[in-house]
Image: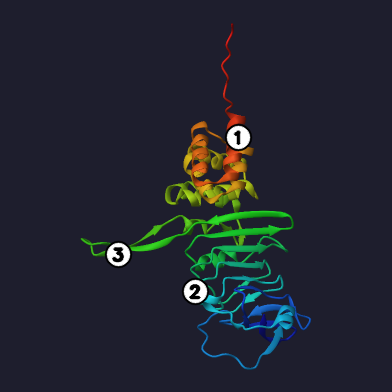
């Protein structure tokens, strides 16, 4: 990859990136100086004119193999991994990056320029490394986007995963009164308020599950539930019981979804917690066989024999 950059004081500002890989991994240092910010429109194809007063950095791979390269901007960008040193994203940095799906950064990233994620309709995963506390810019990123976004928070060997459902607004007209009012769909707007300052508030998050059950689809609910049960940062006993109750009450739909996705870790979590219901387990076995999900089928058959063994009849002569 070839990077255009500028030295500001004792820090590096990223101007543009060129290469062939849509997964962009930025270095932590250039010329021995920390990479701290991106310029306005750094990854956007809507930039008016390219800057000429820049320096050029080439990665070791680029120096060794070279090859044709193009501007990594707009639809050419699929994921960006910022170094822990990154502190600021310039305004409209990702404007029009319609294929951007994943963004990785640390809690040092605190300053987002206006409109940084305008048009990023495919962004669905945020991965955040916590190095100095719980405060992050996740709330601000979520506030710019309406779609479902899955957030992973990493601290050392600990991990928390949170699903933020989609939401959208619809203008509805009351014709007789000639009044327009806004109708909200999806629980995502409520979940986006689950922060204390800029830190994720797990109690607020878990307390909203009743809204998600009323407004969101099974696949969203299943992912949300297993994210909390398998990565239980700040999970209270009452919230844990509520999530388990949902699985028991909707086990057929949940297992159908997990089998379709081949989501083995979630299926193992159900087994570990002893959440099986006989009828739902039988239906899941049939579906796994029909869909050709060999690993899940084998596991479900073992669980069926373990939890609901067939009693053999005894005959006495």
Up/down of 19 relative to 139, above or below:
below
Question: Of the numbered discs in the image, which one, if any, rests on residue 228?
Answer: none
Residue 298: give x, y in percent of width and height. 60, 40
Up/down of 274 relative to 8, above or below:
above
Q: According to the image, label 1 marks what residue? A: 303
Q: According to the image, label 2 marks what residue? A: 118
- Residue 82 visible in the shown view: yes
Q: According to the image, label 3 marks what residue? A: 180
Q: Quadrant of the N terminus?
A: bottom right
Residue 14: give x, y in percent of width and height. 65, 82
For the residue labelled by badge 1, is the local secondary structure a helix, a strand or a loop?
helix
Q: Nearer the viewer, residue 161 or 294?
A: 294
Q: How many marks?
A: 3
Q: Earlier in the sequence, mark 3 or mark 2?
A: 2
Q: Nearer the viewer, mark 3 or mark 2?
A: 2
Specify few, some or many for label 3: CA neighbours under 10 Å numbering under 14, 14-19, or 20 or more: few
Cα distance, mark 3 to mark 2?
26 Å
Picture residue at 55% right of the left edge, 43% below the top: 243
Q: Are marks 1 and 2 in contact (CB under 8 Å)?
A: no
Residue 194: give x, y in percent of width and height. 55, 56
Q: Nearer the viewer, mark 1 or mark 2?
A: 1
């Amino acid at each position: 990859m070839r990077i255009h950059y500028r030295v500001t004081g004792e820090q590096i500002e990223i101007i543009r990136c060129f290469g062939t890989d849509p997964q962009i991994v930025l270095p932590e240092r250039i010329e021995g100086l920390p990479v701290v910010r991106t310029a306005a429109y750094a990854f956007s194809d809507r930039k008016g004119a390219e800057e000429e007063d820049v320096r050029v950095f080439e990665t070791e791979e680029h120096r060794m193999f070279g090859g044709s390269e193009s501007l990594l901007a707009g639809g050419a960008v699929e994921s960006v991994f910022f170094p822990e040193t990154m502190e600021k994203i310039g305004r409209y940095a990702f404007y029009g990056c319609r294929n951007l799906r994943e963004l990785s950064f640390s809690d040092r990233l605190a300053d987002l320029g206006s409109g940084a994620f305008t048009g990023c309709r495919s962004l669905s995963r945020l991965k955040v490394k916590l190095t100095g506390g719980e405060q992050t810019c996740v709330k601000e990123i979520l506030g710019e986007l309406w779609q479902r976004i899955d957030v992973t928070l990493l601290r050392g060997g600990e991990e928390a995963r949170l699903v933020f459902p989609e939401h959208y607004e619809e203008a509805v007209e009351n014709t007789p009164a000639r009044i327009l009012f806004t109708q909200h769909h999806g629980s995502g707007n409520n979940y986006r308020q689950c922060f204390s300052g800029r830190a994720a508030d797990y109690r607020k998050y878990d307390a909203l599950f009743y809204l998600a059950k009323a407004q969101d689809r099974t696949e969203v609910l299943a992912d949300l539930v297993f994210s909390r049960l398998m990565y239980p940062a700040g999970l209270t006993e009452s919230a844990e019981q509520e999530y388990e109750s949902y699985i028991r009450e909707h086990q057929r739909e949940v297992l159908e979804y997990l089998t379709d996705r081949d989501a083995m870790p979630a299926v193992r979590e159900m087994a570990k917690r002893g959440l099986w219901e006989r009828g739902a387990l039988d239906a899941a076995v049939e579906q796994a066989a029909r869909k050709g999900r060999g690993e899940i089928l084998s596991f479900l058959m073992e669980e069926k024999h373990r939890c609901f063994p067939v009693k053999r009849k005894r005959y006495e002569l």
